[in-house]
Amino acid sequence: MRRQGGSTTVWDGLEGGAVDALRRQIESDQPAQAWLLLGPSGAGKRAAALSLAAALNCPVRPRVGCGSCRSCERIARGRHPDVHHVAPEGPIIAVDVVRDQIVPEAARSPFEAAFKVFLIEEADRMNPAAQNALLKTVEEPLPDTVFVLISDNEEELLETLRSRCRVVRLEPLSQERISALLLEQGAPGEAAEAAASAAFGDLERARALVFDDGARERRARWASLPERLTSAGAALDAAYEVLDVARGTVKEREVAQREEVVELSEALGEGRGTAAARNALAKRHRRELKRLEEGVLEEALTYLASFLRDVAAARRGAPESCTNRDAANEVARWASSDVTDAELLAAVERCLAARASFVSNANPTLAIEATLVELSRLLALAPPPP
Ligand SMILES: [Zn+2]
């Protein structure tokens, strides 16, 4: 699944006692058929779920997952016909999705793999009716069907459903641990520390900041945002640029998706159930693009929020808590400006609120524009003395 550092299993790159327990359970004689992976954002729930699905289905190293065969590769890329991804479309996962898609599909045998896996992301966003509809299938699954529910909001899950699952609690990694892992994978020392600090416990994100050119370029752009918020007009220009970056990322993925459609058509031919498979793929693609776009916009907002928080922290003489070390000079400059702490905190809140609004399906374009303009109003740096 990951090639850095000479990995040999799908679990390489995942860390922590919970992951070890999960891995051992999958290797056991009778792995659980319903899992609930809990933990905050960035704890690696999705990566662990994909590793689980790959380990179960790897023909080369059964129950371990070699990470490099066709099956492991396709699962890692979200392209395996027996690994079904379910995620909210809009604010909830409605009961129809469970009734019309999951339950009938779970009654069929896998297409080619040993196990059919349902990955239900943000499972807490199934409303109670949807959770109840899923309950019976999770209770009595076919022997080759596995459910993996992912959630960072355990309280919203019905006890009846939760109790049918084997619960794994994943924790974000410490900054030191992430930094050490990046060093092991060949990152230069300074880059490893800066990325670990900026990634808030999210190993995937830290790794991207070091090894992925696209992520690095985007971060450099986000770093230029604070100084551009000098007027409403300048803020709007900055917002358009952020939106352009997001669209560019989406376009690149669309090219890959078109290849995938061709691949699927070749694999399926015109036989039974192919229309359903095509529809499912089209749906997944739309979701993937939406998430990708939102992810880029979230990145920009997260950068702004953490930068402004760093400024407030620097004023309190806590430079060691600076998360954006690569922007230390800018942070110091802002810390000695006239912007008040109240304005800084209001701006941080505005960024976080805009980020949260994506979940409730707000229009991301409007959200970014409005937020940056408001930030320019809140933060307008005092004009230099005459
Ligand atoms: Zn494999």
Image (tube, rainbow, N blue to C red):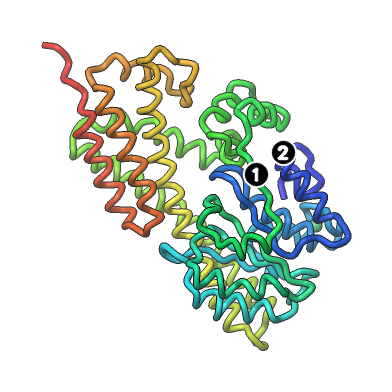
Q: Amino acid at mark 1?
A: Leu
Q: Which quadrant holds residue 230?
A: top left
**Is 307 drawn above or below residue 172 in the view shown?**
above
Q: Amino acid at mark 2?
A: Gly
Mark 1 surroundings within 10 Å by alpha-carbon count, few (fewer than 14), some (14 through 19), many (20 or more): many
**Is 304 drawn above or below residue 121 in the view shown?**
above
How far across and how far down the image is residue 212, in percent? Answer: 58, 40
**Relative side of 62 to 348, left or right:** right
SS at badge 2? loop
**Relative side of 304 to 341, left or right:** right
The residue nearer to you, when weighing 232 against 110, is 110
Can you tell which mark lies on residue 16? 2
Pick the quarter of the image with the C terminus: top left
**Relative side of 4 to 363, left or right:** right
How far across and how far down the image is residue 157, in percent? Answer: 55, 60
**Is 144 drawn above or below residue 380 in the view shown?**
below
Q: Residue at x 72, y 74 (%)?
A: 141
Q: Quadrant of ligand 1?
A: bottom right
Q: Residue at x 22, y 39 (%)?
A: 374
Mark 2–mark 1 Cα distance, whole angstroms, equals 8 Å
**Relative side of 76 to 240, left or right:** right
How far across and how far down the image is residue 97, in percent? Answer: 52, 75
Q: Residue at x 79, y 63 (%)?
A: 57
Residue for badge 1 = 170
Nearer the N terminus, badge 2 or badge 1? 2
SS at badge 1? loop
Q: Residue at x 67, y 88 (%)?
A: 271
Mark 2 surroundings within 10 Å by alpha-carbon count, few (fewer than 14), some (14 through 19), many (20 or more): few
Q: Are marks 2 and 1 in contact (CB under 8 Å)?
A: yes
The residue nearer to you, when weighing 130 against 87, is 130
How far across and how far down the image is residue 196, in percent? Answer: 58, 29
